[in-house]
Amino acid sequence: MSVRLGVLAETAMGERRVALVPDVVARLVKNGYQVLVEKGAGKSAYFVDFAYEEAGAKLIDSASEVIAQSDLLLKVAPPSLGEIKAMPEGGAVMGYMDAYHSADRVNALCERKITAFAMELVPRITRAQSIDALSSQATIAGYRAALIGAQLSGRFFPMLTTAAGTIRPAKVLIMGAGVAGLQAIATARRLGAVVEAYDVRRAAGEQVQSLGAKFVALELDAEGEGGYARELTAEEKIKEQEMLNKHVSQADVVITTAQIPGRAAPKLISKEMVEVMKAGSVIVDLAAESGGNCELTKAGETIDHGGVIVNGPLAVASSLPVHASEMYAKNLFNFIALFGNKDGKLEFNWQDEVVAGSALTHNGEIKHESVRQALTGANS
C-alpha cells in the first residue's frame, strides 16, 4: 500500500495556486506515492484534470473524499477549521498555516492530533533553500510589484529619446532587499528605471549593487536571525526616518517589502512622508497583508492621498498562478523527500532540523517553540 497524498482545490479568497502541478505529481508517483487530486483543483492555475490523470494522479469528486483518504494533505492556503475537522485523527497536513495569528486553527490541529508542517516556518538555512516557499513566492511578489508600480505610475520607467524630446527615466526606491526586494530591483532595472534600494542589513548592499542599483546605507547593522532584519530600537528608527525622508520624496515609485516573521510589518513611510512626495508618485506596499510598511496602506485597496497613489496588494504570488504553483509544488516535493515512506506509512525524522523546525503541531501539542510562546505565553 502506498502513502496517499491529497490535493484540494483552494477555496481562500483570491487564491489561484494549487499545491501540486502535474509534472511534480508524476515525480511523486514514480517515487511510490499515490496522489489524490480533487477534480478542478488546478483550474484556477490553468492545470487541467486530464494532465493530472496523465501524470498518474487519481481524480476524486469531492474535497471531503480527498481529505478522508489522504495520509498527508497538501495545501497552499492554511486549512480551514472545516477541513481540519474532516481530517482523520492523527493525520498530517503541509502548507502555509499563518501560525502566529491563528490560535483557533492551531488548537484545532492539536485537538485532532494532526501533524502539521508550516511552510512559513521552514528554517532559513542553506540545505533548506529548495524547500523555502517564502523565498520562491517572494520572487514572484517582487517581480509583480515592479510591474504594478510601472502600471500605476504616470511616467515611463526607461529613458526615451523621441522626436518630442528626451524622457528621463523614472526613479524607483526599493525598501527591503530580501528576496522580494532583489527581484523588484532586477525587474525595475530591466524596465529601464534608475533604482535605489535600502535595507537595514549591511550585507544586502553587495547584492543590491550587483543588480545595478544604488545602495542607500544607514550606519547601523540590523541583521537578525535567519537572514531577516531585526526590529530597530527607537533611536535607530529616528535615524532611519531622517535618512529615508529625502529618498522617498525624490522617488517616482516606492516599493516596500519589509516584514518580520510573527509580527506586524514595520512602519517605514509615515503620512507626513507621503505628503511631501511628488504628485503622481506611487507606493506599492508588499507588506499590506501584515499591516503595511506605509501608514496609509489599506490592504487590498488602491488609494489616492493628495495625488500619491498607495497600493496595498493581496495574494500577489497568486497573480502568476502557473509559475507560482510550479515553484511551490517543487518546494513541497523537496520537503516530502525528507520523509520516510515505509509499508504505506510516513515516517518523520525528528532529528532533521528542517523537519523539526517546520513542524507546527504533532501528537496534540504545539511543537514549534516560538509559536507556542506567542500563542500561549508558555516558557520552554
Image (tube, grey):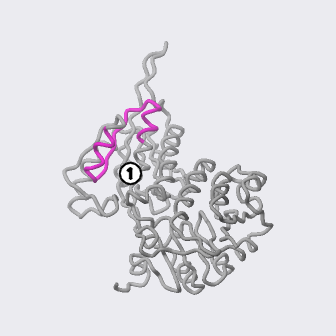
Which region is colored magenta?
185-209
Residue with the mark numbered 1: 178
Residue drawn at (38%, 84%) of the image: 377
Q: Nearer the viewer, residue 160 or 24?
A: 24
The percent position of residue 184, horizontal first and vertical second, equals 44, 43
Q: Quadrant of the C terminus?
A: bottom left
Q: Is residue 287 above or below residue 118?
A: above
Q: Quadrant of residue 28?
A: bottom right
Q: Is residue 193 magenta?
A: yes
Residue 103 placement, left or right of 224 = right
Q: Nearer the viewer, residue 330 or 134?
A: 330
Q: Is residue 318 magenta?
A: no
Residue 241 placement, left or right of 358 = left
The percent position of residue 364, horizontal first and vertical second, equals 53, 86
Amino acid type, residue under disc 1 in the picture: Gly
Residue drawn at (42%, 18%) of the image: 166
Q: Quadrant of residue 49?
A: bottom right
Residue drawn at (39%, 81%) of the image: 373
